[in-house]
Amino acid sequence: MLIKQWFDSGFFGGRQQLISGTSGSSEADVNQCEELMRGGSKSFFSASRVLPKRVRYPAIALYAFCRLMDDIIDDGQDDEHIILQLQKRLDLIYAGTPMAVPADRALSEVVLQFSIPKTLLEALLEGFKWDKQGRQYESIEALYDYAARVAGSVGAMMCLIMGVKNERALARACELGLAMQLTNIARDVGDDARNGRLYLPRAWLREEGVDPDAWLLKPSFTPAIARVVNRLLKNADELYARSQIGIGQLPRDCRAAIFAARLVYAQIGREIERHHLDSVSRRAVVSGMRKKILMIRSLGAFIYSKGDDHDLVPIRAIQYLVDASPKESSNKKHTGSFEQRMICIIHILEKAELHRMQSHLHQ
């Protein structure tokens, strides 16, 4: 299909566009950052393919460094030493003298170019520190504090990379990060428990008659756990709905990628539901075909303008991230070139063709 040919050729921000994305980074740096992302979050990697080249490179650089920090913390033994070393690396990045590591060099250019405040990356580092400490969360509000650090911060940074500094758009981007993190937690209940980690709100478990400490020693799937997972997914869905309102505030050429990420991650929740909310004995996976369909669906988001978020009460956990971010009264509108607009139109026609082919298959 035409869309596959475009993706394979790198038309939507492939390797050749990445290499020319930032003058100070070598081809080798860019390739290594992309490989880190490709081997990490497949959902994020898929959605990123639809980003315009001016956004895709810095997004990959940001993700590569975040992934590197996460891996270092997971693999390390001396918790305090590791955190201090990562803090030093951040200091060097912001001083413009990064370590001789591809991800550090690439990120150093990104934070300078897009005025990304150090507070956002330090929030992420703090969340990783909480992971290393094995911190657990009594309430959903406490879990939001954690999610704000490890995912809301990334949402705010992505917003800045897209050139958007509107306060409401920043809040919606942080909420999308929260939603994705809750989905991740719901998907990984069993894997986390077998590694001695518990992210489900302890109060919710007790309300269902489950002793959190005893369950963590011998994790198993029960109707009570299913109800807690379902409750977490409902919270995630509310956050997805809030975040979706902000898509219309993004540049037109970025909306499809963000909407794709929102759809693919939310689909993980639907897969968990399809398997009776059992994320203890199995791990939900969105099939490649389903991802492609969702990504095609997302391509209509360039005309997205649904919703009004003026009456939304800010979520406390993300407010400090929004406050730390540089803001302007109104964000710039990136309408895109005529070529970009024509690509969007062709995508809509591609979607119609897909529906037509599916109809014939069912006849």
Image (cartoon, rainbow, N blue to C red):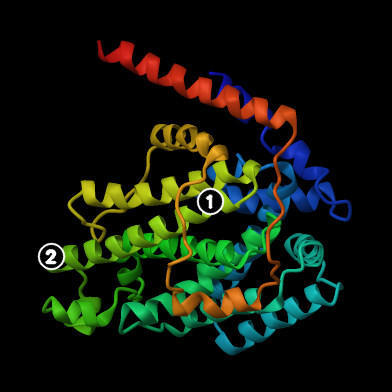
Dot label at residue 13: none
Say which label, 1 or 2, has the lower sequence index.
2
Number of the front mark, 1 or 2: 1
Residue 199 image offset from top left, x and y in percent: 34, 74
Task: Residue 339: tell me if it is visible.
Answer: yes
- For numbered disc 1, what is the local secondary structure? helix
The residue singled out by tag 2 in the image is 222
Q: Residue at x 24, y 65 (%)?
A: 231
Q: Which of 66/158 is in front?
A: 158
Q: How many marks?
A: 2
Q: Which of 300/218 is in front?
A: 300
Q: Decide: marks 1, 2 in contact (CB < 8 A)?
A: no
Q: Where is 125 relative to 11, above or below?
A: below
Task: Residue 61: tell me if it is visible.
Answer: no
- Mark 1 vs mark 2, CA separation in Å: 37 Å
In which image quadrant can residue 235 be found?
bottom left
Residue 303 image offset from top left, x and y in percent: 55, 38
Is residue 250 shown left or right of residue 28? left
Q: Amino acid at mark 1?
A: Ile
Q: Amino acid at mark 2?
A: Thr
Q: Residue at x 71, y 57 (%)?
A: 163
Q: Which of 294/43 is in front?
A: 294
Q: Residue at x 49, y 38 (%)?
A: 298
Residue 307 image offset from top left, x and y in percent: 45, 52
Dot label at residue 247: 1
